[in-house]
Amino acid sequence: MRKYIVKELELLPKKSSLHARFTGNWTNNAGIYELGDGLLLNRWYHISYTLSDSEKRLDIYIDGEWFGYYGIQNVTTENVIFNEGPLYIGRSFDNGFNGEICNVRYFNWRLCAEEVKQDFVNDVIKYGSKVALVHVSTRKYLTTNGIKYPDHDQDMVVCKGWEIDLKNDVFTIIEAYGTSVCTGSPVPLNSIIGFKHQATEGRDDNDDFVIKRSKNVSCYLLNGDIISITHVNTGYSALYSHPVLLDDGTQEVSCHGNGNDVNNKWRIELIDGPNL
């Protein structure tokens, strides 16, 4: 008979309360049975689960804030049992998770509260953040080639390389044209924002866009999100590209569709470094 060693974070059915368990040398099912009033539907959460035998405790964090814990009482005789697999993400032995999970990180040590908070902060894209946009289906970066559109004085955007060009592929997230926001504040989904090209610093009222995550979850924009980008001045048509190449070998980018097509999908990458 196979013995399963459990370290899990689940949601209780119907209520969606956090259910965090682990195996010890005195039981195979210790931990928190029901934590909080339940998570809300159609909302994005950053959840951290930490477990330590030396500290004799399990801790749960939501959006970087300490949310609950379980402490071993008999610290001299009771221990956490760790094993080497398997690791299931999105499902257990026979039950699955009907939702969206991304940006999963596994650490081989227990994060402290400050590290959990920093991990959450590092994932959130803010006003003033430097980002790059990758076309999902072709895996090429959005960039400029220095050529103006024929009908107005604005640099043409195309998709070009599979490796990032830190000079030409980087944009700054800014406020919508004619508005003001606090630099450093998180960018909410479904709000109008602007992209300012880092190299040319090009920006006018034609650069306003609405960012939507693929599941249309109403929360903040996160590093690694798969998004659609709809252009305000063209009636909220979505940024679009495809494998067909232009004469110079770049990939055409236009505004077409409502954002649901596979060619409307982009991955946003948070860019950081001393040369930016």
Image (tube, rainbow, N blue to C red):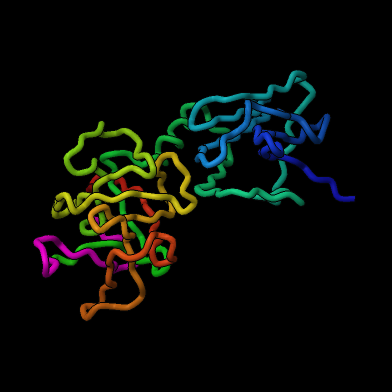
The answer to whether residue 147 shows anywhere in this view is no
Q: Residue furthest top?
A: 73
Residue 39 magenta? no
Range covered by the magenta-colored residues: 147-166
Q: Say left or right for 214 vs 238.
A: right
Residue 103 in the figure: left or right of residue 169: right
Q: How many marks?
A: 0
Front-lying residue, 87 or 103: 103
Query: Mainly helix, strand or loop, the magenta region?
Result: loop
| Residue 163 image offset from top left, x and y in percent | 33, 64
Q: Which residue shows up at 72% across the image and 22% down it?
A: 72
Q: Residue at x 28, y 56 (%)?
A: 235
- Relative to 276, is 44 on the left or the right? right
Q: Is residue 136 visible?
A: yes
Which of the two residues, 157 or 259, is positioned nearer the viewer here? Answer: 259
**Residue extending furthest toward the front:** 235
Q: State the image coordinates of residue 60 (x, y, percent, origin top left).
A: 60, 30
Q: Position of residue 259 (x, y in %)?
A: 39, 59
| Left or right of residue 55, residue 257 in this image | left
Q: Is residue 152 magenta?
A: yes
